[in-house]
Amino acid sequence: MSSIPNVIQELTDLLSRLPGIGKKSAQRICFYLMDRPRDEIVRYAKGLIDIKDKISHCPVCHFITEETPCSICRDPKRDASQLCIVEDSMDVISIDKTAVFHGKYHVLGGLISPLDGVGPEDLSIDLLIKRLDQVKEVILAINPSVDGDTTAHYLEKIINRYKDIKVTSLARGIPVGGDLEFTDEATLAKALEGRSLINGK
């Protein structure tokens, strides 16, 4: 029988499901929170609820936003002829921090992964196709992995139907199996600047 109160145990179990947090870290967080003032805990709780209630996906690019469309899609200074395709919203944030890319983004919302039952229809590819008419270059900024390569090849086939679109990918300065989210800004900047041509256009 555990001497830990059920409330602490349940919260520990919930927190340990978060990425990068193990049981011990989750338990430490629980005990930290237990000693904080109640109004601070209420702010944490409100922040979590607001994430679900106030944040949605942009209907144009699928990036996270509080407004429709998102601030990136609304920005007239962005080059609409360049479209950077990424797996998730964290990748947009990581690339934008480099201040090298000034085009627009498209967030897939995942990668094609047959083993996990994720197919093209589960991603925002339909939204992407609607945007291709005004695009001159597509940058495939997708994590170099088996699923990433599968997704990139699938997208390349679709984009190649549009004869005037150049398709490039990030230079492979990013390690295979690595995530854009955890790649430093200097490496991301170099990868963007050294992107390679895929479809010869």
Image: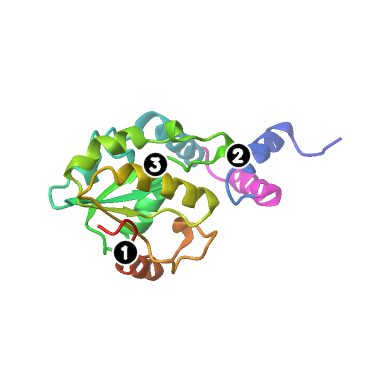
Residue in view at x 30 percent, y 38 percent: 128
Residue annotated with mark 2 = 115
- Among the 4 quarters of the image, the one containing residue 18: top right
| Pointer 2 or 3: first along the chain | 3
Residue 200 or 74: which is nearer the viewer?
200
Q: Amino acid at mark 1?
A: Thr
123 vs 84, left or right, is: right
Residue 70 or 166: which is nearer the viewer?
166
- Could one spot residue 66 in this view of the protein? no
- Among the 4 quarters of the image, the one containing residue 126: top left
Residue in view at x 46 percent, y 41 percent: 110
Instruction: Name above or below for residue 192 compared with residue 70.
Output: below
| Bounds of the magenta segment | 22-38
Query: Residue pushed farthest top?
Result: 53
Residue annotated with mark 1 = 98
Q: Which mark is residue 108?
A: 3
Neighbour class for label 1 at 10 Å: few (<14), some, many (≥20)? some
Q: CA distance from mark 2 to mark 3?
A: 18 Å
Q: Looking at the figure, which quarter contains the C terminus?
A: bottom left
